[in-house]
Image (cartoon, rainbow, N blue to C red):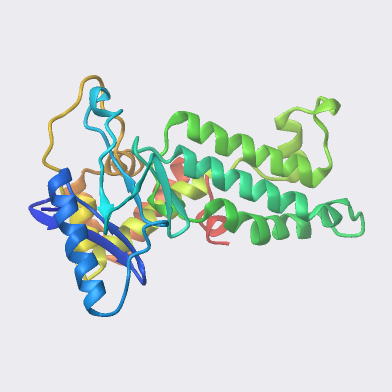
Amino acid sequence: MGINIGGRDITNLRYAYDTALLSDNLTSMKRILHRVNNAGQQAGLLLNAKITKVMHIPASKESSNVEPDIKIDRTSLENVDNFKYLGSIKTSDGTCSKDIYKRIAMAKQGMVSLNNIWKDKSIPKPLKFKLLKTLVGPRMLYGCETRTMRKVDESKIEAAEMWFFRRLLRVSWKDRSTSGNVLAEMGTGRTLLSLVKERRLKYIGHAERNTKTDLMKTIFEGKIEAKRGRGRPSLSYVDQVSKATGLKLQSISQKSQDRVIWRGIVKSSCAAANINPDDAAR
């Protein structure tokens, strides 16, 4: 009825009152929604058709223009190609680009709102750098642990980091100061992208060690039964973790059970990416 991942039928993902229903076909989706709607009505709760959306993830380009007709009490639900869930944007193409670009925009907005701080010459540069990490960094990094990234996404993140540094130093593009000069004046290297990857590895260790529920582990390790599309497949989340650690999935699952061993793997992976784990922790 739902989506089979690693032999487990998953029909919904829930956090508080935010619920995402899942199915691999239209008939089953209508059935699941009908059951949820009926159960809610019996408890005196009603589904709001205006804020309930449908997102179709096409199996091929030929089916990408098909919009499923799903209704709640005769009211048709709006079809969308993306929606926000728990602060992150989910898209029908399965990429995280839209979410990454949204986070970059939010971080830049936060940076601009602190212009009075960056302009204040009485505030030492090291303190401004700490304020950048504390006040702007969280906007940029929210949800980064669960993202897959393409090369173009990584380039956007690195470009955003340089934009932050130039803004902090009050260096205009008209000054023709190179990125190397900006980094030298900041007294640091490019660390934002490596920090994203470091957080992802820590999250994997947490997910693999989680003993309260095996849902995260099932989704992380499980395979979805589906036909492979044409062309070269995109790197998956597991692929990117394996590339960062040099380990296959089975080894990741085994080694992450020991916190000390996994911490060492994270540290060595950070070193390979030229990031100081102590700086990343801050």
**Going by the image, does 137 lie left or right of 184?**
left
- Viewer-proximal residue, 11 or 74? 74
Q: Residue at x 13, y 36 (%)?
A: 226
- Viewer-proximal residue, 44 or 153? 44
**Going by the image, does 1 lie left or right of 258?**
left
> From the image, which quarter does the C terminus lie in?
bottom right
Quick check: 144 above or below 234? below
- Asked whether residue 155 appears in the rendered view, the answer is yes
Q: Which image quadrant is residue 212 in?
A: bottom left
- Viewer-proximal residue, 61 or 9? 61
**Going by the image, does 95 lie left or right of 153?**
left
Q: Residue furthest top?
A: 231
Where is residue 157? Give x, y as percent: 56, 39
Q: Residue furthest right?
A: 122
Q: Residue at x 38, y 37 (%)?
A: 95
Q: Which image quadrant is residue 156 in?
A: top right
**Going by the image, does 35 lie left or right of 80?**
left
Q: Residue furthest front?
A: 74
Where is residue 153? Give x, y as percent: 49, 34
Where is residue 239? Give x, y as percent: 28, 39
Q: Which image quadrant is residue 247 in?
A: top left
- Viewer-proximal residue, 280 or 15? 15
Q: Residue at x 42, y 32 (%)?
A: 150
Where is residue 260? Give x, y as percent: 33, 65
Q: Residue furthest bottom?
A: 43
Q: Residue at x 35, y 53 (%)?
A: 265
Quick check: 44 above or below 55? below
Q: How many marks are shown on the rendered structure?
A: 0
- Asked whether residue 11 appears in the rendered view, the answer is no
